[in-house]
Image (cartoon, rainbow, N blue to C red):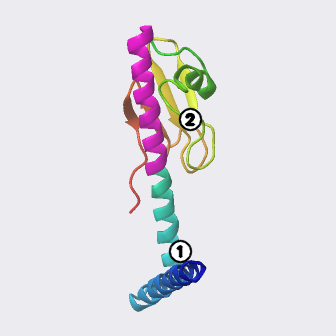
């Protein structure tokens, strides 16, 4: 059994190495410089973070919508902790308070409406890369990378 695990572990490490070498060869074979390739990798990672943050925000939005059915309004508050206090553990198993960049999500609600915001990849509020969910609908999303 231990021999089997060792063989599988060696295979996985070897497969990762083969994929890495293949990607490098592809990048150079297509005439791309290392810098161009690195920019594409960073963009792909950033797009993955946008997708993960959007998914988390949609999940929080669905939980908030369910709370309105029970309570007749959104949880009033000015922090993401106010929202989480109302939906964890009854509507969500775990609290989600940060975006994929590790920054705190912003939540604002007067009880009738709510806004959930991620400052996006640059970490600055009010810029084009922000993700903004208002009353269950995205009112702003970053443009896809080119």
Query: Is residue 58 found left or right of 108 in the rendered image?
Result: left
Whether 65 is among the magenta residues is: yes
Q: Name the residue nearer the viewer: 103 or 8.
A: 8
From which residue to which does the magenta span run? 51-72
Mark 1: few/some/many CA within 10 Å (<14, 14-19, 20+): few
Q: Between tags 1 and 2, which lies in front?
A: 2
Q: Name the residue nearer the viewer: 50 or 139.
A: 50
Q: Name the residue nearer the viewer: 36 or 47.
A: 47
The image shows residue 101, relative to residue 8, as above or below, that is above
Q: Say the numbered circle drawn on residue 91.
A: none
Q: Which one is earlier in the sequence, the residue at label 1 or at label 2?
A: 1
Residue 107 appears in the figure? yes
Q: What residue do we see at 63% from left, 47% from top?
A: 102
- Marks 1/2: CA distance? 34 Å
Q: Say the numbered circle drawn on residue 38.
A: 1
Q: What residue do we see at 50% from left, 23% from top?
A: 90
Q: Residue furthest front?
A: 1
Q: For mark 2, what is the residue?
A: 94
The image position of residue 136, as x and y in percent, is: 38, 27
Query: Is residue 143 found left or right of 36 in the rendered image?
Result: left
Judging from the image, what secondary structure is the residue with disc 1 in? helix
| Magenta stretch, overall SS | helix
Q: Quadrant of the C terminus?
A: bottom left
The image position of residue 78, as x and y in percent, is: 61, 20
Whether 50 is among the magenta residues is: no
The image position of residue 116, as x and y in percent, is: 50, 30
The image shows residue 61, relative to residue 41, as above or below, that is above
């Amino acid at each position: 059994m231990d021999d089997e695990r060792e063989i599988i572990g060696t295979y996985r490490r070897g497969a990762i190495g083969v994929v890495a070498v293949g990607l490098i060869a592809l990048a150079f074979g297509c005439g791309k410089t290392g810098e161009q390739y690195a920019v594409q990798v960073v963009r792909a990672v950033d797009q993955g973070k946008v997708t993960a943050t959007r998914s988390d925000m949609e999940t929080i939005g669905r939980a908030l919508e369910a709370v309105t059915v029970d309570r007749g309004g959104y949880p009033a508050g000015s922090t993401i902790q106010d929202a989480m206090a109302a939906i964890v553990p009854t509507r969500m198993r775990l609290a989600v308070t940060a975006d994929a960049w590790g920054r705190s999500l912003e939540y604002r609600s007067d009880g009738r409406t709510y806004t959930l915001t991620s400052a996006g990849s640059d970490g600055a509020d009010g810029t084009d890369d922000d993700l903004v969910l208002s009353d269950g609908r995205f009112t702003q999303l970053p443009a896809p990378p080119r």
